[in-house]
Amino acid sequence: MSKGTGAGIDRLKALLNRVGPGGKGRDAEPARYQVDDEFSVPGIGTVVSGTVVSGRIKAGDTLLLGPSPTGEFTPTQVRTIERHRLPVPFVRSQEMATLALRKTDRRDIRRGMVMLAKELKPRAVWQFDAQLVILHHPTTIKRGYQTMVHCGCIRQTARIIDMPADVRSLRSGDAAVCRFSFVRCPEYLEPGEPLVLREGRARGVGCVLAADPDTPPYDKSKHRRQRHDRDGMSRRARRRARKIDRADAKAGAAAAPAAAAPLSPMRRWLFILIWKLPEARHDETHYS
């Protein structure tokens, strides 16, 4: 096949037409829809585009949309469905479609959200465990490392908060099970989903092993390791105390009355010439 002359294009098209759909359908499972984009259509309202991961979605179905920044899922009704700019009564798994939602504000929707059936009883997660393989990284990866996580339609920065005890850092080619924590908002994850890590030229792949919905978001200030001195006070607390002492001393100096500045030698001679010598001459003339 040549891209210049076009020779062999017909043979390639004939081969692609004989290839059947890949993978097995998941129509019997509960509905799950990943939101890839959102926009507004005049006369229609809020419309979302994405892919049906599993199940079937029909016009008029009520699904749970979320998670919100607080981790909540809101019931939303599907008004109409379109595929390739044509209205359809339903969509099945592994199909892309746009859904018009009823009484839903566009500002409440973001990329990475999901629309799920009620029987799934979804819960948002902040932290999750993943099997990670580093394909390339110029230096090393340690605890606290932040990277962009791509998992389905999810695009969000996550932080590595825990690593195995026998692993201090990861380099190119290393593999380990790490715990991640999302930075901005919670997401909906299921075990077994593949993910990709990207940060600059660094690349990594992995798979979600477990998602913990009961774990609160990672608090960096609470888990920060503090170095203590002999008095038991951390360096950060000691710097803060010194800063407060300097502020108090400055405020006390400003409130105290200003002391008289000592006279320089030149000013002392001028004072004598102007004030003291005339007074001494006046006393001499008076007594004489």
Image: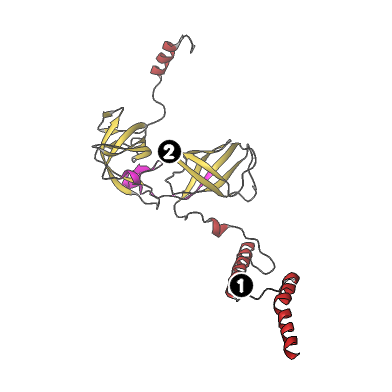
Where does the magenta region start and end?
105-130
Residue at (59%, 68%) from the top-left corner? 247
- Pair 2/1: label in front: 1
Residue at (44%, 52%) from the top-left corner? 213
- Residue 5's label in the rendered image is none
Asked if 178 appears above or below 241 in the picture, the reply is above
Asked if 9 appears above or below 156 in the picture, the reply is above
Q: Position of residue 94 (x, y in %)?
A: 37, 32
Q: Nearer the viewer, residue 24 or 215?
A: 215
158 displayed left or right of 28: right
Asked if 108 appears above or below 25 in the picture, the reply is below
- The local crowd at label 2, few if under 14, some if 14 to 19, many if 20 or more residues have their Cα within 10 Å, is some
Describe the element under mark 2 as helix, strand or loop: loop
Q: Position of residue 189 (x, y in %)?
A: 44, 44
- The local crowd at label 1, few if under 14, some if 14 to 19, many if 20 or more residues have their Cα within 10 Å, is few
- Residue 153's label in the rendered image is 2
Residue position marked by numbered label 1 in the rendering? 253
208 displayed left or right of 123: right
Q: Amino acid at mark 1?
A: Ala
State if disc 1 and disc 2 touch (CB < 8 Å). Answer: no
Q: CA distance from mark 2 to mark 1?
A: 60 Å
